[in-house]
Image (cartoon, grey):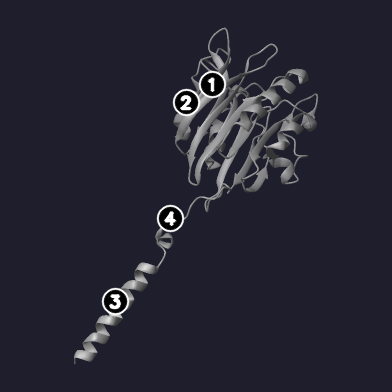
Amino acid sequence: MRLALKKRLLLGFFIICCLFAIPLSIFAPTEIMDTFASSDSIKIISYNIHYGMSLKKQPALDQILSFLKSSDSDIIFLQEVDRKTFRSYFQNQPEYIAKKLSMDYMYTPTQNMIAGQTGNMILSRYPIVASEEYTLSFDKYPRKLQKAVIQAPSGDLAVFNTHLDLSRSIRKEQIDEILKILEETKEPFVLAGDMNAPDPSELYKLSSLAIDTGKAMKKETLPTFINKKYISRIDYIFTSKNISLQSYEVPTLNLSDHEPVIIEIQ
């Protein structure tokens, strides 16, 4: 009996020692890798909404919002968003858009009109935990770069939204300014907006830090701007090189003088 008891005690002691020998790291949560990745995809749209007016100068904001809502997007970049201007019937578009889409938002006025303002807007399904705006070089009309840090499922994501100048020489300065800001950005990032650059070589410098999503998906020939003078791709979404790109598309809506650019990242 005493021998059997001793064997049981020794066996119990051996089991306890084995348990303590197991590395605690297997019970710890997995660390987020340097590459921004998630089991859930994130859908992103960039869209110059032309003050919510169609090419026929008819109100189209509600139609645009119906599309944005049905797209089930997580992050939306908008350019040419009016706040209480005459041409937009004095509507507070940023508040109206955010309420209709039920998203967190950041609005940055870029130009004061005779009445009201126009500017750019970032909307997010995830919380916006920090925001900042930068004044860029400009010719006739002020231009700005928005930055928002978004608490995405896989960690913080920095998103930038802009609308560059009509002058090529000024755009060159603006791109250099944006590049310096991106170089100082620690988080994975997305840069989007109306770049007003029909010649993609103007944006070549950005390739040192970012991926042109249209080019990466071999869809750079899809136009985003159509008028009587020319058809061109001037709306872009760039991502930092540590983001996994899943898809890219430019649907034809004819609700603005631009078409939306849509990507999915994971």
Q: Mark 2 points at which residue?
A: 96
Q: Judge from the rendering whether residue 38 lies leftward or rightward of residue 223; answer left or right.
A: left
Residues under numbered marks 1 and 3 in contact, where contact means CB atoms less than 8 Å apart = no
Q: Which residue is drawn at 58% across and 29% down?
A: 78
| Residue 15 screen position, x and y as percent | 33, 76
Amino acid at pointer 4:
Pro
Q: Mark 4 points at which residue?
A: 29
Q: Which is closer to the viewer, label 4 or label 1?
A: 4
Badge 4 marks a residue whose secondary structure is loop
Q: Residue at x 56, y 12 (%)?
A: 86
Q: Which is closer to the viewer, label 1 or label 2?
A: 1
Q: Mark 3 points at which residue?
A: 13
The first of marks 3 and 4 along the sequence is 3
Amino acid at pointer 2:
Tyr
Q: Judge from the rendering whether residue 4 lies leftward or rightward of residue 142; answer left or right.
A: left
Q: Which is closer to the viewer, label 3 or label 2?
A: 3
Camera-side residue of 60 and 73: 73
The first of marks 1 and 3 along the sequence is 3
Badge 1 marks a residue whose secondary structure is strand
| Residue 119 screen position, x and y as percent | 57, 20
Binning the other alpha carbons within 10 Å of mark 1 as few (below 14), some (14 to 19) or many (20 upward) gives: many
Amino acid at pointer 3:
Phe
The first of marks 4 and 2 along the sequence is 4
Q: Name the residue under label 1.
A: 108
User: Disc 1 to disc 3, how far (Cα)?
Assistant: 67 Å
Binning the other alpha carbons within 10 Å of mark 3 as few (below 14), some (14 to 19) or many (20 upward) gives: few
